[in-house]
Image: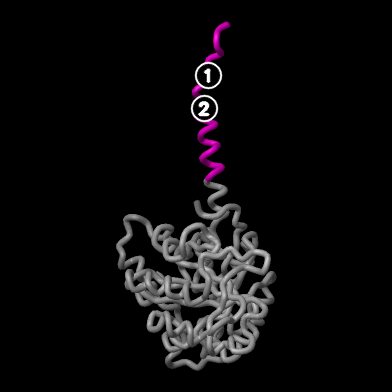
Amino acid sequence: MARPRENPNFQLRLAAGVIVGLLIVAFGLLTLTWHCNSTNEPEPNDAPLKRNPGDRLSDYDSLLLNQIFQKSSHNSYEQEIALKEQLEMRFLRSVELDIQEFVNEDWMVFHDSCDRKTSVSMLSDGLRAIAQYHQENPHHQILSLFLDIKWDALRGEGTPQFLDELLEKHLGDALFKPQHLLEKISSKKPYQTLHHAIRIKKWPTLGFLKGRIMVYVTGYIGKYSSDAHKRVAFLTKSISKPDDILSHKEVIMFNLKFHHTNLSRQIRKEVCFSRRLASALISFP
């Protein structure tokens, strides 16, 4: 019996479908940290500003911090590759660590008691990895480090002040703090809160922020939020409706579900940032 003839067009369509499927799954890996437009006027089609291959580096450096988006990993300590390699090989510019119990003047890093998978045992280990990347690449673009504070992390000797001291110890002069932002944009005009201050003048440019690291705290930030503009890290809150934006006067970064596109645009109008979280379907290969 003659063997049926294979259809080459069918094979091509099947291969194309597999590739598209893999791209869709890979997209679920990422947490997109969306740095929004600085004006109340939306950009045409709400398109993010990106660097094109033909752009001059000086043009890219002239972009404001809130005119870009950053590729990020969620629960970076659970990925299959090390934290420093995520910055080097995956070109991530935003990573996240969950901090748990305070033990021996340091915080343990893992998700919860049922999921202790981690490549970063202690917070200091993660900070050292980021500091090493900074030392080897001193002119890197701005890095964002998210610290998800779990419910019992800031208890006993694990105070907000000690957390600031630990960040200062490992990241030092690379840190760009709330105080630096206020000095940069409101040297003459008075400000009432951090949120009010960022509406007075423009954000710093990427060129100004080269080689700097911004730390954001999220989760149980109640104890950390006092004197927010004097802290080392910026505050982050999870919200679900526009009315929540102005109720957090010292918050400039908001956590959103990935489908909250309209809320992200509203945050843009308030001259803030948002971090939109996509479901992590698989880890890095």
Type of amino acid under label 2: Gln
Is the residue 150 above or below the residue 26 in the image? Answer: below
Q: Using the numbered discs, state the Cα–Cα distance from disc 2 to disc 1 in whole angstroms.
A: 8 Å
Find residue 122 and report its horizontal and vertical position in percent. 52, 74
Magenta region: 1-22
Type of amino acid under label 1: Glu
The residue pinned by badge 2 equals 11
Q: Which corner quadrant holds the N terminus?
A: top right
Please tell me whether mark 1 sits on a helix, a strand or a loop.
loop
Is the residue 277 above or below the residue 217 in the image? Answer: above
Is the residue 187 above or below the residue 215 in the image? Answer: below
**Label 2, residues with CA under 10 Å away: few <14, some 14-19, many ≥20:** few
Please tell me whether mark 2 sits on a helix, a strand or a loop.
helix
Please report the residue visible at 34 percent of the width from the left and 55 percent of the height from the top.
53
Mark 2 or mark 1, earlier in chain: 1
Find residue 111 and report its horizontal and vertical position in percent. 62, 68
**Label 1, residues with CA under 10 Å away: few <14, some 14-19, many ≥20:** few
Q: Is residue 49 visible to us here?
A: no
Disc on res. 6: 1
Please report the residue visible at 67 percent of the width from the left and 78 percent of the height from the top.
151
Whether tag 2 and tag 1 are in contact, CB under 8 A, the answer is: yes
Q: Is residue 198 visible to us here?
A: yes
Question: Toward which corner of the image does residue 262 lie, by quadrant?
Answer: bottom right
Find residue 88 and report its horizontal and vertical position in percent. 39, 62
Main SS of the magenta part reads helix
